[in-house]
Amino acid sequence: MQETEIARQRPHDIDQAIEAMRRTLEYYHARHDKRAIFLRLYYIMTLEVHAAINGLGDYAGKRIFADPEWVRRLSGRFSTKYFESLAPGNPSRAWGCADAVAKDPRSSVVENALLGINAHINFDLPRAIAENLDPAELEDYRTLQLRKFDHDQVNNLLIRVLNQIQDTLAASYEPGIAVADALMGDLDERMSGEALKHYRERVWWNALSFAAALVDKRDDLVRDKLDWESAQLAKDLTGSKWLWFSERTLNAAVSAFRKKKDWTTITLERPHPDAAVEPVLLQR
């Protein structure tokens, strides 16, 4: 698989999204490409949503979403935004910042993770939700409330896997994260959970604005707003030099007692054994 093929992937639903992410992670790991850091946590989160949609594992016999098929399609659209961002000359300012930091050998794992989360949630997600809404639904208050319910249910699923994500980032990329996590107890998980809910709440209202603007053919105006807001947050994150220096220092101290991880040996998480994953689609 080549860079151009990765950027051309267009998953239609969550099953295809998982397969596309897995193939891309294998490509990144083979090259020690730091873009793997954000994609790995995104992949883990998507696996959790996939299990909830299909009633697998801990979700067996439980109904999580009002409209699972809507969430299934949204997950495909959302991942497509990620792959579109990889095309040359295409990224927003927030994605451009995230990609530049990923190329910096001194950049830290948490910095890479947060920059990817910012770009994908604050810039990509509102547009994906808007495109997943039928224009007629904008005037259907009852249906919109059910869409919002499903959006909020995803919040709960993401919070549920925060510990798993921290453990994975520590085990695969930066052992110092485990020490920081132990020192902070559950404070970092609570803070991350609240921040996640805060930004995803903003995402919902931005998505409705974008959907309305699509109908009126004024979507460029809203897109520019999303681009500016996500770029400002990316600027704030990259400006926190003392924080990333502290993270790198802690990791260097811990890594002195650990064998360096070979990314090519990383074993990726897999969907539940009962899950069927569809082949990846490429843009023609």
Image (cartoon, rainbow, N blue to C red):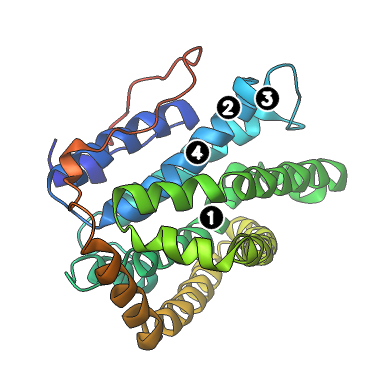
For label 4, the SS is helix
What's the distance in space between the residues labelled 4 and 1, CA to CA?
14 Å
Q: Sequence-wise, which precedes: disc 4 or disc 2?
A: 4
Label 3–label 2 contact, CB within 8 A = yes
The C terminus: image quadrant: top left
Residue in the foreground of this view, choosing between 101 and 108: 108
Mark 2 is surrounded, within 10 Å at the Cα level, by few (under 14), some (14 to 19) or many (20 or more) other residues, namely: some
Q: Residue at x 43, y 58 (%)?
A: 178
Q: Residue furthest right?
A: 142
Quadrant of res 60: top right
> Vertical placement of 243 versus 28: above or below?
below
Q: Position of residue 135 (x, y in %)?
A: 67, 46
Mark 3 is surrounded, within 10 Å at the Cα level, by few (under 14), some (14 to 19) or many (20 or more) other residues, namely: some
In the picture of the structure, the residue carrying the numbered disc 3 is 59
For label 2, the SS is helix
Q: Residue type at mark 2: give it.
A: Ala
For label 1, the SS is helix
Q: Position of residue 116 (x, y in %)?
A: 40, 61
Q: Residue at x 44, y 31 (%)?
A: 12
Mark 4 is surrounded, within 10 Å at the Cα level, by few (under 14), some (14 to 19) or many (20 or more) other residues, namely: many
Q: Residue type at mark 3: give it.
A: Tyr
What's the distance in space between the residues labelled 3 and 4, CA to CA?
14 Å
Q: Residue furthest front?
A: 257
In the picture of the structure, the residue carrying the numbered disc 1 is 125
Quadrant of res 48: top right
Label 4–label 2 contact, CB within 8 A = no
In the picture of the structure, the residue carrying the numbered disc 2 is 51
Q: Position of residue 257 (x, y in %)?
A: 23, 59
The N terminus: image quadrant: top left
Q: Sequence-wise, which precedes: disc 1 or disc 3?
A: 3
Q: Which mark is residue 46?
A: 4
